[in-house]
Image (cartoon, helix red, strand yellow):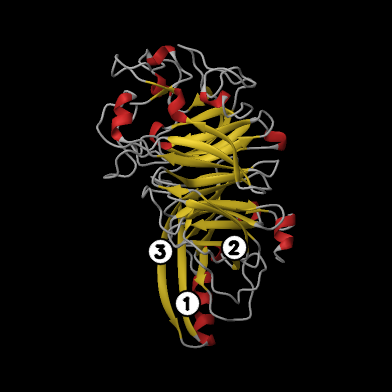
Amino acid sequence: MGNLNVLICIFEKRKIVSYKYFIPIKNSITLLFLIHSFTSCTSYDNSDIIVETPVQIDTTNQTGEENNFTPIGTIEILNIDKIDNNFILVNDAGANRVYIMNKHAKLLYEWSFSNNIGNDVYLLSNGNLLASLEADEPKIPLGGKGGKIQIIEPDNTTIWEFIYSSEGGETHHDVQMLPNGNIIAMVWERINSAIAISEGFMLEEDIYPESIIEINPSTNEIVWEWNSMDHIIQDYDQTKANYGVISENPNLINLNYTPQNEILPGVKGDIMHANAIAYDKVNDVIFLSINAYSEVWVIDHSTTTEEAKVHSGGNYGKGGDLIYRFGNPNTYQNPKGTRLFHNNHFPNLLEDNNQGKLLIFSNGNDIKQSTVYELELPSTYSLQTNFNNEPTVTWSFTDPNLYSGKVSGAVPLENGNILITEGDFGFWEVTRENEVVWKFNTEGFFWRGYSYSKNSPEIKLLGL
């Protein structure tokens, strides 16, 4: 009949101690004997047995789904009554795979790509994918490299492509479609060492600060742009025009906060390492996750490109300066407020009843433990000196076993639970009461997971 992998989970004071067994199955009598042995054991009951690779037998699993498939990973069902029963779009950057699975780890749909994924890929409401991919020959070899953006139909046909890849700059990590159909993307801009020094940078090396571009897919025209180098301050070289007191200028970016990349040892110049972009359509602002600064920047998108270069204009009157920032007040030498983030990924803006809140993953590199926060943002974006500008923590989750030093994130589920992506593990589903109800693990490097309702238009358009 084949083989059976059995994962036995022993519960000790709500902590799970897992053991895997590889058992040869010779015939149906052996299988029935094993099932009887497990179910009659006094140490644990049959709810603690999870079949990792079921044999092809005509039976049903705990949730009533036919067990005649090979799961793509190991699931742990910890509280079946509280599991959200919708689908997950999985971004496995390590294997360059993007697929949809259900909570039984059944593969339902998978795409193929012309290039390696550059991290983010997600479904649009019309069933197409918006994908950040690596260019044919990426010019800036940093982590999360990209250079190519595509829109892909369900049959893998590419219907739109935009290439931004040169020695001078390259898109990377993340993209998002705006309500008007335009697309915003992050760009590394190469600044040679001579120019960097002239701007007050303390090291003699090329740097790759962050920019944002907005692309009109109908024309491939860049219709709006923001550049972080237009909004820097430094207190290293007083001979430079941008010399100033960091603590008195919370709307500006300290160029020398992270002089060398702490995320990717051996790769210099990636001084900011933005890794996520999000758009607040209610306030017309952009959120930029800055991993090396352990904070999120908020930028006024209502400006023109010219206003985005200066310090006035737009709905907030600050031009392209930061209108808000949070997660690490040390970046602007603010003694008030508590640092929350220790490297961060995926500021996920919530909607509907949770409008004004976001979920974010703090990697916790220095303590080797990650935390997911739900934050309530201020009703008005502003920054004050010597003042606690940090948002309010409305919910958080951590666990001694939750740790990924890179990537990762969290999304809300239809039943109110939170789906957490742990980059080098897989997924956790937790309740608002911090009960872990489901886990998925397999070999991979998981950028993000997105949850889609079985009844959502994009899922129906895929025929699932």
Q: Quadrant of residue 193?
A: top left
Query: Which residue is the site of mark 3?
Result: 19
Question: Residue 164 at what x, y percent from top left?
Answer: 49, 48
Tell me which label, 1 or 3, sits earlier in the chain: 1
Query: Which residue is the site of mark 1?
Result: 4
Tell me which label, 2 or 1, sits earlier in the chain: 1
Q: Secondary structure at mark 1?
A: strand
Residue at image position (55%, 34%) is 225
Mark 1, other Cα within 10 Å: few <14 / some 14–19 / many ≥20: some
* Mark-to-mark CA distance, 2 and 3: 24 Å
* Mark-to-mark CA distance, 1 and 3: 14 Å
- 356 vs 8, nearest the viewer: 356
User: Disc 3 residue type?
Assistant: Tyr
Q: Is residue 382 above or below residue 375?
A: above
Residue 249 shows in the view: yes
Question: Residue 378 at what x, y percent from top left?
Answer: 60, 22
Tell me which label, 2 or 3, sits earlier in the chain: 3
Q: Is residue 118 above or below residue 263?
A: below
Q: Which mark is residue 285?
A: none
Q: Residue furthest left?
A: 204
**Of the residues tagged 2 and 3, which is closer to the observer?**
2
* Mark-to-mark CA distance, 2 and 1: 21 Å
Q: Is residue 2 above or below residue 16?
A: below
Quadrant of the drawing holding the C terminus: bottom right
Mark 2, other Cα within 10 Å: few <14 / some 14–19 / many ≥20: many
**Of the residues tagged 2 and 1, which is closer to the observer?**
2
Horizontally, is 272 left or right of 390 in the view? left
Query: Which residue is the site of mark 2?
Result: 101
Question: Residue 4 at what x, y percent from top left?
Answer: 47, 77
Residue at image position (72%, 37%) is 352
User: Disc 2 residue type?
Assistant: Met
